[in-house]
């Protein structure tokens, strides 16, 4: 069989066949609301009066006290009770990007206020953690000690060890990501709370200066979050957001002087931000800044590395059509890649570019969006197992999420303390979790589309904030796409009358 025929068959299966077979209608608006709701279940600190996830309670109220800093807010990273600042900041960046790109659709879905609250909860923690121009607290909680216990955050008695970076012990990745988070969040709040937006931007600029002047790779959160791609991607990511937020030529000059650090990549993740940088700066290139063409070329390469049928495809798909980057929490790469594909295809459309050429195959922007949407549909139940990988969405979803707070009875229903080792009976049971962590995206199926709902399998059952944050952006993009299609159909209908 020729490569051309193979390519056509793959494209038929992905983009045409599902519509012919028909599939259960997916409520993307409901999915978006639940993806955002998830963040309320991850909150640390004193919960607000309008808290909707009622099985959670106040927790970690004294975080930071040993060093006289207030670090009681923010988000627990995943199914554990540690606050890792670097991936938390990435989550804030992604949520803010979603709010910037798809504000109208998120507002129409009545979710903009909730999304802004989610962004603010994380951004406030970053502001508190940045205690001096050259000090940023990057982690609260001893990861090793925490992972030896299975207990609710409301009962925590593990060491709340503090980790920080300074001018003498730098961590450029963490500081630059924090800068990106605050810069992107400042755009979100520009028309909502001008004073807060200005504060975010000022602190972002300070964090960027810290990250750039005192360079050194961040290792404070190893072995849980180790930097494999270095810090140049975070510096470019922060500079791109700061340029977008401030318009200051200083950041554009930094980008131009460091564009050699951009390269073709096949993933967008908490560790490697280059695909996001390339998507952001391609918009500037198409708006007239032709000296940024390298970022446009690299963004095209990202598309070609993912699209089935591309001659330069690097990431395989499962038999059911899911992108499969690696086995550990694979859906994090699916949600983040989809978000970039959606945003980049939108950027190309606005720039009147018809698509991306991958060798002999041309992918139109509609094909790129269709592939990204197929990934969302897979996650939400259109897969061989007919399983939704979003907890609480659909009729069949994971019941044994690898998550301490969700798997142990709430403090309201079981007010007695459950200590470090006391939670093991809930960890090991085959019973469903007593608390439904609505909206949580799990790690997902294996390379053969198989999935075992077993709590101890953290690689496939544990949620993370950044996985959900990218899901928010991708779902908002689907709503935007559906809105355009609806408007187009309505217009065509009027014309045919």
Image (tube, rainbow, N blue to C red):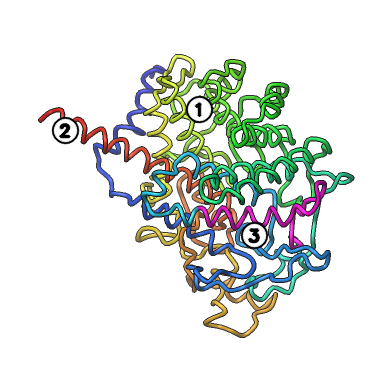
User: Farthest bottom residue?
Assistant: 416
User: Farthest front residue?
Assistant: 195
| Label 1, residues with CA under 10 Å away: few <14, some 14-19, many ≥20 | many
Q: Position of residue 73 (x, y in %)?
A: 66, 63
- Residue occupying image coordinates x 56% and y 39%: 325
Say what secondary structure mark 2 lies in.
Answer: helix
Q: Are marks 3 and 1 in contact (CB under 8 Å)?
A: no
Residue underneath mark 2: 493
Q: Position of residue 242 (x, y in %)?
A: 65, 36
- Residue occupying image coordinates x 69% and y 65%: 72
Q: Position of residue 379 (x, y in %)?
A: 43, 48
Q: Are marks 2 and 1 in contact (CB under 8 Å)?
A: no
Residue 213 versus residue 258 in the image, above or below: below
Q: Tell me the CA gap for discs 2 and 1.
A: 34 Å
Horizontal side of 53 relative to 373 (left or right) equals right
Residue 86 versus residue 12 in the image, above or below: below
- Residue occupying image coordinates x 48% and y 54%: 451
Q: Nearer the viewer, residue 91 or 314?
A: 91
Disc marking residue 303: 1
| Label 2, residues with CA under 10 Å away: few <14, some 14-19, many ≥20 | few
Horizontal side of 356 relative to 24 (left or right) equals right
**Occupied quadrant, residue 147:** bottom right
Look at the image and say whether residue 142 sits in the magenta stretch.
yes
Look at the image and say whether residue 130 sits in the magenta stretch.
yes
Q: Which residues are magenta?
A: 116-144
Horizontal side of 319 relative to 146 (left or right) equals left
Residue underneath mark 3: 74
């Amino acid at each position: 069989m020729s490569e051309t025929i193979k390519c056509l068959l793959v494209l038929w299966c992905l983009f045409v066949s599902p519509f012919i077979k028909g599939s259960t209608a997916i409520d993307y608006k409901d999915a978006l609301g639940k993806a955002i709701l998830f963040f309320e279940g991850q909150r640390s600190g004193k919960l607000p009066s309008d808290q909707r996830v009622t099985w959670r309670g106040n927790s970690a109220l004294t975080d930071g006290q040993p060093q006289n800093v207030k670090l009681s807010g923010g988000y627990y990273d995943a199914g554990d009770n540690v606050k890792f600042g670097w991936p938390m900041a990435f989550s804030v960046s992604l949520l803010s990007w979603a709010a910037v790109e798809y504000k109208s659709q998120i507002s129409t879905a009545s979710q903009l206020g909730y999304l802004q609250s989610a962004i603010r909860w994380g951004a406030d923690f970053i502001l508190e953690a940045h205690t001096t121009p050259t000090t940023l607290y990057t982690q609260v909680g001893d990861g090793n000690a925490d992972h030896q216990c299975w207990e609710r955050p409301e009962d925590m008695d593990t060491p709340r060890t503090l980790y920080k970076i300074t001018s003498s012990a730098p961590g450029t990745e963490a500081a630059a990501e924090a800068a990106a988070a605050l810069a992107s969040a400042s755009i979100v709040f520009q028309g909502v709370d001008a004073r807060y937006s200005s504060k975010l931007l000022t602190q972002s600029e300070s964090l960027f200066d810290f990250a750039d002047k005192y360079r050194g790779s961040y290792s404070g959160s190893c072995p849980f979050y180790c930097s494999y791609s270095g810090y140049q991607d975070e510096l470019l990511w922060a500079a791109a957001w700061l340029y977008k937020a401030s318009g200051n030529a200083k950041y554009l000059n930094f980008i131009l002087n460091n564009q050699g650090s951009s390269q073709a990549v096949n993933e967008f993740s908490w560790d490697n931000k280059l695909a996001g940088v390339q998507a952001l700066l391609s918009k500037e290139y198409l708006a007239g800044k032709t000296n940024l063409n390298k970022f446009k070329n690299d963004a095209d390469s990202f598309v070609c590395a993912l699209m089935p049928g591309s001659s330069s495809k690097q990431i395989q798909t499962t038999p059911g059509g899911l992108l499969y980057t690696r086995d550990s929490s694979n859906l994090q790469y699916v949600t983040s890649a989809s978000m970039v594909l959606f945003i980049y295809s939108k950027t190309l459309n606005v720039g009147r570019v018809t698509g991306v050429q991958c060798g002999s195959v041309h992918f139109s922007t509609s094909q790129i969006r269709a592939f990204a949407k197929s990934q969302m549909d897979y996650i939400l139940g259109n897969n061989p197992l007919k399983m939704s990988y979003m907890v609480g969405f659909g009729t069949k979803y994971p019941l044994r999420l690898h998550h301490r707070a969700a798997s142990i009875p709430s403090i309201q229903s079981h007010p007695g303390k459950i200590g470090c080792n006391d939670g093991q009976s809930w960890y090991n049971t085959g019973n469903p979790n007593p608390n439904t962590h609505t909206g949580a995206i799990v790690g997902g199926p294996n390379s053969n589309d198989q999935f075992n709902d077993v709590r101890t399998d953290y690689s496939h059952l544990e949620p993370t904030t950044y996985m959900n944050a990218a899901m928010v952006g991708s779902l908002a993009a689907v709503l935007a796409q559906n809105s355009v299609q609806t408007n187009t159909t309505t217009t065509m209908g009027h014309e045919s009358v």
